[in-house]
């Protein structure tokens, strides 16, 4: 690995002062490409870099310049940030590191000690999509709900604020966003209990709360916080507040410096099934919407709801990208949004009115979006009113949180699309007596994936969407359905990491593949590019994870990215690179542990199956197949010992690796879990039927 002279190291270590220039002006500067200061590089969230040293003519010469092996075990999904030669990133257990952007030499490390809060750790959420830089601060959000400000030069903690009610199953996986000396953060947890979604702005200098905006109304008997909540309450029925209502905003925050507005992408209902939370129907504002707020005080300005009365987990927490588009002979200050529901939206961000909405993937729940009202034309029966409904897309969406980029030179938006068909049914659920779960995943509807939604069998593609012409410019097949986000540059390039471990560069205009490099692990994080000393780098975090195991553990297991078997890395490439990555372990298939002597009791296993669902399967997968996101318990010797199993599950012995402590589980519950896990292991060991 390349090293710099000591003087350069000392200069880099003292470069914390560089962050003091990071303000709205710096974050709005689209002309400079040396730094990557925010999740979307600049406030417009385009993930477009003006750098052109690496372009279509020479990208085939891209090589590893430097790399850092990391001790992380779980998935790496975040966007690194670069300011004046220092690269900052967040990894497993929310540990933040600062390294030299030209060598990877470590400058400082900050550990928020998430494991010490094992009782409040939320299962399946040991990932973070990124951090924020503001003036002299690095700002991070933790799994257990804290927002923390660090000194950028030393990594020392400056302030620490709890943003959630720790008695509720709320967590944070999203990146905080900064604007006007404030930082905004939301949270997730809709499916794990009665939650009322909200976003909160804090002062970046102190961590003190500036304002909070609730996404759904509370109990009318308690009064409403503002006129927006009073308006929203008219779109709900029944006693929704007993279920929380949902709407958690865990991603999709964009500040519009030109219009001085903040846009919030909001989440699905709590529970998913509208028949439970709002039995008389209704649009259920502000679920699954984009809401424009005053950034100074959080006051409502306008909203556009993508899925009124949502009932399929079609949240709108996906990226909100700002662009000026020439449409119909005028310049539209547009907002680009490709949420889970399968439609690509162009919205006038001045008025909040729909400009266009077109399907970018297979959509069976609606035939289209009415151009006059902006409302979807729903297909009868799609809400599983009387029978099982076959729906595309599903809970993983036609596009999830994986970063979308927009290139103003090509006029195209680039993002990974998902093509899967699902079934929804609540026929086996007592809707009238359903109760909110206590820290357990329960959406109030049975669902399952039935296969690919496309005739060609593809479940994932990389798409280049033309928001002006309202159609695909090009599309490429991808391995599997869960692939990482994109970055684009003035070199007419698009970069994307894939689930199969390949990091690929494409011609942004045509989609032609120009370069690929296998990093030795599945890729879940989006890349960035920056420049130091006249050399352009392309960097990304490599480490499989962040996949919705409860939605597809068996499907992601086929990649062979076994938990803990593949080194997590931060890798930087350049045209002058000379480094060589160590050999990779390669894909590995899990071999279930043979232990017939355990003696599975089928009746105990049946009880354990229900216990496992909604709690353990969030990380360890349905059918106990984790797909690399967590240890595959079918191969675990811990399960064979009642004491060892209790020490891990109830005692928190492996909290430092991201295993929450479930101290409420009884000996009987632990016993049933062990029998279920061993039943699944023995089923995998059994010879296939002839």
Image: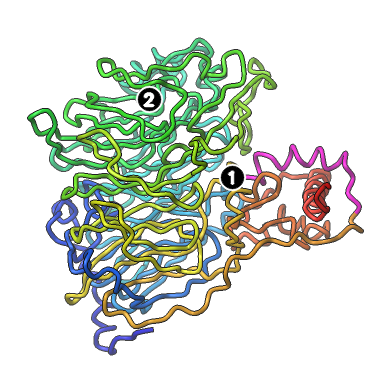
* Residue 197 visible (yes or no): no
Residue 264 in magenta?
no
Residue at 57%, 22% (x, y): give it.
389
Which residue corresponds to mark 1?
A: 552
Q: CA distance from mark 1 to mark 2?
A: 29 Å
Crowd tier of the residue under label 2, counting other residues whose Cα lies within 10 Å: few below 14, some 14–19, many 20 or above: many
Q: Position of residue 174 (x, y in %)?
A: 41, 48
Question: From which residue to which does the magenta span run?
Answer: 599-617
User: Is 612 included in the stretch rendered in magenta?
Assistant: yes
Q: Which residue is mark 2?
A: 286
Determine crowd level at label 1: few under 14, some 14-19, many 20+ residues with C-alpha closer than 10 A: many
Residue at x 77%, y 52% (from the top left corner) = 684
Task: Say above or below: 558 vs 448.
Answer: below
Nearest to the observer: residue 117 or residue 686: 686
Residue placed at 17% from the left, 59% from the top?
A: 50
Q: Main secondary structure of the magenta part?
A: helix
Q: Identify the residue shown where x is 41% and y is 26%.
A: 287
Q: From the viewer's perspective, is 472 left or right of 77?
A: left
């Amino acid at each position: 690995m390349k090293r710099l002279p000591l003087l350069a190291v000392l200069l880099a270590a003292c470069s914390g002062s560089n962050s003091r220039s990071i303000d709205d002006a710096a974050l709005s500067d689209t002309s400079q490409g040396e730094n990557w200061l925010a999740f979307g590089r600049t406030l417009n969230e385009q993930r477009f870099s003006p750098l052109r040293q690496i372009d279509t003519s020479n990208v085939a010469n891209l090589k590893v310049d430097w790399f850092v092996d990391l001790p992380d075990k779980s998935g790496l999904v975040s966007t690194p940030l670069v300011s004046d030669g220092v690269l900052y990133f967040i990894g497993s257990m929310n540990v933040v590191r600062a390294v030299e952007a030209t060598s990877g030499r470590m400058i400082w490390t900050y550990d928020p000690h998430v494991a010490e809060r094992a009782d409040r750790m939320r299962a399946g959420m040991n990932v973070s999509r990124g951090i924020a830089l503001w003036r002299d601060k690095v700002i991070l959000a933790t799994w257990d709900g804290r927002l923390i400000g660090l000194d950028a030069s030393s990594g020392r903690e400056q302030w620490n604020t709890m943003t959630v009610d720790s008695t509720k199953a709320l967590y944070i996986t999203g990146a905080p966003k900064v604007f006007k000396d404030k930082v905004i953060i939301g949270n997730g947890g809709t499916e794990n209990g009665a939650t009322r979604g909200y976003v909160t702005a804090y002062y970046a200098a102190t961590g003190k709360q500036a304002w909070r905006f609730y996404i759904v109304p509370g109990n009318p008997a308690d009064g409403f916080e503002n006129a927006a909540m009073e308006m929203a309450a008219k779109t709900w029925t029944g006693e929704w507040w007993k279920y929380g209502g949902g709407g958690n905003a865990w991603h999709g925050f964009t500040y519009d410096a030109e219009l001085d507005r903040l846009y919030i992408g909001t989440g699905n209902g709590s529970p998913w099934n509208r028949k439970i939370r709002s039995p008389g129907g209704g649009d259920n504002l502000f679920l699954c919407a984009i809401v424009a707020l005053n950034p100074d005080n959080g006051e409502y300005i306008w909203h556009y709801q993508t899925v009124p009365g949502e009932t399929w987990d079609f949240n709108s927490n996906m990226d909100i990208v700002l662009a000026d588009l020439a449409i119909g002979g005028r310049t539209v200050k547009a907002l680009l949004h490709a949420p889970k529901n399968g439609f690509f939206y162009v919205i006038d961000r001045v008025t909040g009115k729909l400009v266009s909405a077109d399907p970018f993937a297979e959509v069976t729940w609606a035939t289209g979006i009415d151009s006059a009202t902006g409302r979807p034309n729903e297909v009868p029966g799609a809400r599983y009113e009387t029978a099982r409904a076959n729906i595309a897309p599903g809970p993983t969406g036609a596009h999830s949180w994986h970063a979308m980029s927009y290139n103003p030179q090509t006029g195209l938006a680039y993002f990974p699309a998902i093509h899967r068909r699902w079934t929804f049914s609540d026929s086996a659920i007592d809707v009238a007596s359903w109760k909110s779960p206590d820290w357990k995943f329960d959406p109030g509807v049975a669902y399952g994936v039935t296969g690919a939604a496309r005739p060609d069998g593809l479940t994932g593609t990389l798409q280049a969407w033309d928001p002006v012409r309202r159609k695909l410019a090009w599309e490429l097949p991808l391995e599997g359905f869960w692939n990482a986000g994109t970055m684009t540059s003035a070199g007419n390039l698009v970069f994307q990491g894939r689930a199969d471990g390949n990091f690929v560069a494409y011609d942004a205009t045509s989609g032609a593949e120009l370069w690929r490099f296998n990093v030795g692990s599945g890729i879940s994080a989006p890349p960035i590019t920056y420049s130091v000393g006249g050399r352009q780098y392309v960097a990304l975090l490599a480490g499989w994870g962040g996949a919705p195991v409860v939605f597809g553990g068996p499907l992601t297991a086929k990649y062979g990215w076994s938990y803990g078997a593949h080194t997590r890395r931060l890798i930087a490439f350049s045209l002058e690179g000379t480094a060589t990555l160590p050999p990779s372990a390669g894909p590995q298939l899990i071999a279930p542990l043979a232990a017939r002597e355990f003696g599975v009791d089928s009746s105990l296993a049946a009880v354990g199956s229900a216990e496992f669902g909604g709690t353990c399967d969030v990380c360890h997968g349905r059918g106990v197949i984790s797909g690399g996101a967590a240890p595959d318990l079918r191969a675990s010797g811990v399960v064979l010992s009642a004491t060892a199993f209790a020490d891990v599950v109830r005692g928190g012995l492996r909290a430092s690796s991201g295993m929450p402590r479930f101290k409420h589980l009884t000996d009987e519950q632990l016993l049933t879990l062990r029998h279920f896990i061993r039943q699944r292991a023995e089923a995998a060991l059994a010879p296939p039927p002839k």
